[in-house]
Structure formats: C-alpha cells, structure tokens
Amino acid sequence: MFDPNNRRFLYPFINCTNCGPRFSIIESLPYDRPNTSMKKFQMCDECKAEYKNPLDRRFHAQPIACPECGPKVQLLNHQGKTICEKEDAISEAVQKIKEGKIIALKGLGGFQLIVIAENDDAVKILRHRKHRDEKPFALMFPSIEMIKEHCFVSGVEENTLISSESPIVLLRKKSGFRYPVSDIQHQASSISDSVAPQNPYLGVMLPYTPLHHLIMKKLSQPVIATSGNISEEPMCIDENEAIERLSGIADYFLVHNRPIIRPVDDSVVRILKDELMILRRARGYSPLPISITNAAEEDFICVGGHLKNTVSVKKGNKVFLSQHIGDLENTEAERYFCNTISDFKQMYKVNPTYLVHDLHPDYTSTKYCSTQNLKAISVQHHLAHIAGCYEENHLEGKCFAVCWDGTGYGFDKTIWGGEFFSYSEEEFSRVAHFRKFRIPGGDAAIKDTRRSLTGILYEIFGNDIPIAKLNRVIPENELLLFAQMLNKNINCFETTSVGRIFDAVSSLLNICSKSSYEAQAAMMLEFAADQTTLSRYDFNLTDNSIFIVDWQPMFEQMINEIFRGVEASVISAKFHNTLVEIIITLSKKIGLTDVILTGGCFQNVFLLERTIDKLVEEKFKPHWNKLVSTNDGGISFGQAVFANHILKRQNKTKIIQTEKMGA
Ligand code: ZN
Ligand code: FE
C-alpha cells in the first residue's frame, strides 16, 4: 500500500488470502465472494487474474479489490453532502482531525468516532455530545513505539497489540495517574486526562485496517477511536443510518461503499500473569468456536444475560459465541440481539432443540424465549459463570467455584452475587455465600452506591446508624430517607452481592458515590488501593449446613479506621486483602484442589492477582476466565456448557433407568 510503484498505492481496501475483512462482510457461509458484501463490485481483469492464480498471494482472496474496481472512500459533511473523494478525502479528514473535529469513520465492523487524543477541548466535546461522562475511551496509536512512550508494555502485551486480532489492550499509563504507591512518578502527559479520567490504564490499539494505517500515518498522533453510537446503543454500520444517528456528534463522516453486514465492536483484552484475558470478545475472536468436551446430541441457542449481552449457538461439540451485543436496555439493542440470533441460526444452519436462558424472569433475553416455540432450559446466573470457566479451563471432576459479581437472580428469588459452589459435570451445590443485606431503591441502587452503604449500615446498626459520623458521605436527610425505606421495607431488595459490597466500601471511603458507568465505583476503589499494604480486616464464618461469610467485623473495623484518619488507600487495600483471605479460608474448609474464580468482580486485577498468588502459595490450583469474558459477556457460553452438563446428566440417568428396568 505504501509502494508508489504498486497499482494499489495508497488504496485502502487491499487484502490477501490470509487477511482482510471476513465476519463483517459475510452474508452466509461458505465464505465466497457472492456470499459477501463485495458481490456488487465486478473484479477488473487484473484483479480477476490474481484471484484465479494459485501462485498469487491474492488467490481466492474474496474481498480482492483495486482502485479500478473496488470500494471508494468519501468525506461527507454532517448533512451527508460529499466534500471530496479518494485520497483527498483521507487527507482532508486527517486535517479536520488535527483541527480537533470529530470524525465518524466507517471502519471494519461499524462506525468509530475519531478525535485527537491530545486536545482536551475536543475530547470534552466528544464526551458531552456522546453523553458519556467518565467511562474511558480507547485510543489508537500510529505505532508500537509511540505506545511505549505513553504506557508500560511487556513482551506479551506487545505481541498481543501487533497480533492479527489487534485488540484493544489495557496498559498501565506511564503518566497522567497519581498512584497511591509513590515509586511511580507523576508526570504531565500529552494525552488529555479526559480520555480515561482517574484511571491508571489506557485501552490502546494499533491500526488494523488499511484505512486506519493511511490515517494514522498521515496523522502521527494518537486518537480516540470509540464506537460510533450514542451512549449504550449498538454501533452504526450504514452511512445513511450513521448520518441520521450521529449527526449530533460527528462533524464529518469518512465513509466508503463496501457494506458492513453486521456490527462487530473492537475486542478488549488485558494480559494477566502473562496470559491473555479477553474482557470483550468481538472483532478478531468472535465468532470462532470453542470446542466443548462430552457434547450432548441436542443443539441449542443460548441467549445470554442482560448486561454486556452475547448469544451462543451450541452445534455438535462446538459453541459459537457471538460478538459483544451490549446492554439490552433499549429497542436498538433488542433489535441487534434478535438479529444476531437469527443471523447465527442461519449462518451455522443450526436446528435447535432448546433455548437456554437466564433464571431471571424479567430479563429481555428471558422474555424473548417465551415468545419462541421451543423448549427452554433456564440456567442460574452464577452457575453459568462457573460452568463456562470450568469448561474453558478443561477441568474434570469436582472443584470449588467462587463466583462474585453485581447481580444474578438466585434460586430463592433474591439477588445473588457473593457465591461459592462445589461444581462438577455431575452435580453442584451452593456451599457458601455472603451474609444477606437489603438495599433500598431497586435498580437505582446500582448507580447510587450510597444505597448499598446504607443497606449494610442498617443491617449492622439498625436505626442507630452513626449519622453524625457519616455526614461527609451521605447528607443526613438522604440517609434518613434510605433508612426509612429499609425500616418499612419499601422497594428494597435482598442481596448477597459482592459487587454491591464494593459499592458500599467505595461510598464509605468517599471515593465514588455515583457510578456513571457499570462497576465504576469498584474500579475506582481498586485503583485507590495501596499495593504495599498486606494487612486485612476480620470476618466471621458461620456454619449451619452452608457457610455464611459475615462482613460485619470488617465494616466495623473500617468505620473505626476512617475516624482514626487512616488513609483511604490503606483501607481499600485491607478490604481487598480481606476478600482474598475469605477465598483462602473457604478453599481450605472445602478442601478441593481446583479453585474457579469467575464473575465480574474478577476483572479487578488487585483482587484476582493476589487471590491467584495466595491460592498457589497454599497449593491450590486457581482457574480464571481467559478466552471468554469473566463478566456477563461470558454468560451465553456458560449457559451452553451448563445446559450441556444437564442434558448429559439426564441422558445418563435415562440410560441407568432403562438398564435397571431391563434388569
Ligand atoms: Zn481490480
Ligand atoms: Fe454476572
């Protein structure tokens, strides 16, 4: 592309047999040009000759194209009027980006919004127009060298960045974050603090399509490259739709005429213990199947959870896990969800016997199943997390599973989230959970962390909450209101959720009282933790057929320390260390070697790394999610595995019963 003597010099739609678009342009399988969105482009003679020549690197490269016969780029203004075309369009777009304008770029799997990352005003305008307060934006850098100027990059991280999957990798910032530990010096960064406010990480990627390469080479500066959508809606894939939906955000549109068949977001990964950990599985990884052992004969479709939804198709011994769909909170997302199900059904020609859904009766995904004329299997949320983690780690026999997250509907119809199971393909049982507490205010509690805190305080102190002492955290009138709701049990829900305990602590330490995106309070609490603190708080473990983890001593000690003026960074670290100790203590009590760590809470590196280290030290074998997300993005895969385990068990019981009857 950068060779002036090549006929494809500076042409942004080059590819070869081993690279180029695939999932985002396929209409149906097999992967042949007439089944892709390239079918409308007639190959010129030269391209046709390359396509047909077995010795050519473009032999049967389905999206083969050149400036003569292939797609073209255009720059449009926000009303959709063409400003210029081809190379001029790219140069002009780069100029606009430099000036701080917001460009909607038609990328590989959908529109991205591009903004210069070093212009604080431009970044703030993007936040304002996109209605995105604090959630971090991902960055695209022109080169790995420039990434290294801004972030710490290990060998494995570098290999992941330059891999063909080319995901967003979470890397530690070299500057722009004041660590609670003092050995890393705070320096001014050229990247706007508004990119990832109060966050020690940057989500970083390299150019992954020819068009990105052309832009980034001309620009030679990092840019924000975030999904082209309004807050949590699905990404736009079509230029007309983009102009309609994004004209309030983008100043210009850099588009092309190769249709995108389905939205595919950028994948997000981190490297933990030198291993890949996929947090959002999409471009580059999805829909590559994951094989499962001892597959049942029946095939099924698994509709996932509610937040960070994905769907999965189990066909034979393979599970095809969809790209990230998103939170099923609006009609656009619901449509994308339904389309993805029919898309996968058609693409993999699956004839499902069952639909598999979450136990929660009110989830959009669960309700969808009741409209379909198929037998359904419901899977408890945390068992889905556990089964998925069990399978991807190729475990056998019984293991001890720790599943901590924000919300999951339990068998007793309360909200679970601090769960411990013993689990095998054959059987499972809930062996421990966190002490329950009530939270006032339904769904509002997930954003307003002070409600979780009041719930905990009410459980400890009843009506004698030390209001005066807590004034700096919650205004007295609100505290009284929440306490009254608890008193009269109005609109309260009962929970064992560790996610909500993170919220409560984050609120108690005055770190985050309102989450503007999912898990923000927990993340800020994690980032505040002092790495050098090794001590912890006390907790109680009561044992009546099932262990109950009582957090009361921990909260009492925390409150005392706050009033003695102990630093929040120390309290946060001691809180994390207590959680680690809870896992170790229970692992010893249960006495199984393999320990599963799964659920959204284990996106927390401080918690996960310390737990892994401690478990290894104590001769346990820790297992965590790597290929499939530990958050609710992994639920549909877990549902597939759990349903498979159920069917295998049932079929086995049937065989045993038939044998008995025969005898
Ligand atoms: Zn051509
Ligand atoms: Fe979950």
Image (cartoon, rainbow, N blue to C red):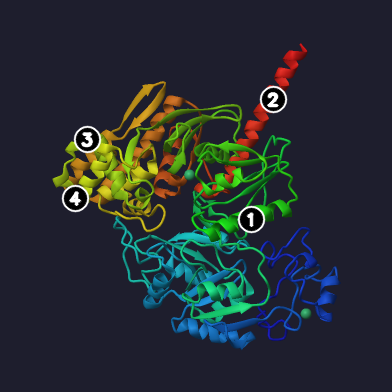
User: Which label sits in the foreground, 1 or 2?
Assistant: 1
Please report whichever mark, 4 or 2, sits nearer to the chain's N-terminal start. Answer: 4
Please report whichever mark, 4 or 3, sits nearer to the chain's N-terminal start. Answer: 3
Q: Nearer the viewer, residue 217 or 318?
A: 318
Q: Is residue 448 above or below residue 492?
A: below
User: Which label sits in the foreground, 4 or 1?
Assistant: 4
Amino acid identity at mark 1 = Thr
Amino acid identity at mark 3 = Gly
Query: Which numbered marker is on residue 340?
Result: 1
Q: Is residue 398 above or below residue 500?
A: above
Mark 2 CB lies closer than 8 A to ligand 2: no
Amino acid identity at mark 2 = Lys
Q: Residue at x 51, y 79 (%)?
A: 220
Please report whichever mark, 2 or 3, sits nearer to the chain's N-terminal start. Answer: 3
Quarter of the image with the N terminus is bottom right
Please report whichever mark, 1 or 2, sits nearer to the chain's N-terminal start. Answer: 1
Please state the total of marks drawn on the protein image: 4
Please report whichever mark, 3 or 1, sits nearer to the chain's N-terminal start. Answer: 1
Label 4 neighbour load within 10 Å: few <14, some 14-19, many 20+: few
The residue that disc 3 covers is 462
Label 2 neighbour load within 10 Å: few <14, some 14-19, many 20+: few
Q: Is residue 524 above or below residue 361?
A: below
Mark 1 CB lies closer than 8 A to ligand 2: no
Amino acid identity at mark 4 = Asn
C-alpha span from label 4 to label 2: 59 Å
Q: Residue at x 45, y 45 (%)?
A: 602
The residue that disc 2 covers is 652
Q: Nearer the viewer, residue 333 or 285?
A: 333
Label 1 neighbour load within 10 Å: few <14, some 14-19, many 20+: many
The residue that disc 4 covers is 477
Q: Is residue 297 left or right of residue 388?
A: right
- Could you tell me which secondary element the residue under label 3 belongs to? helix
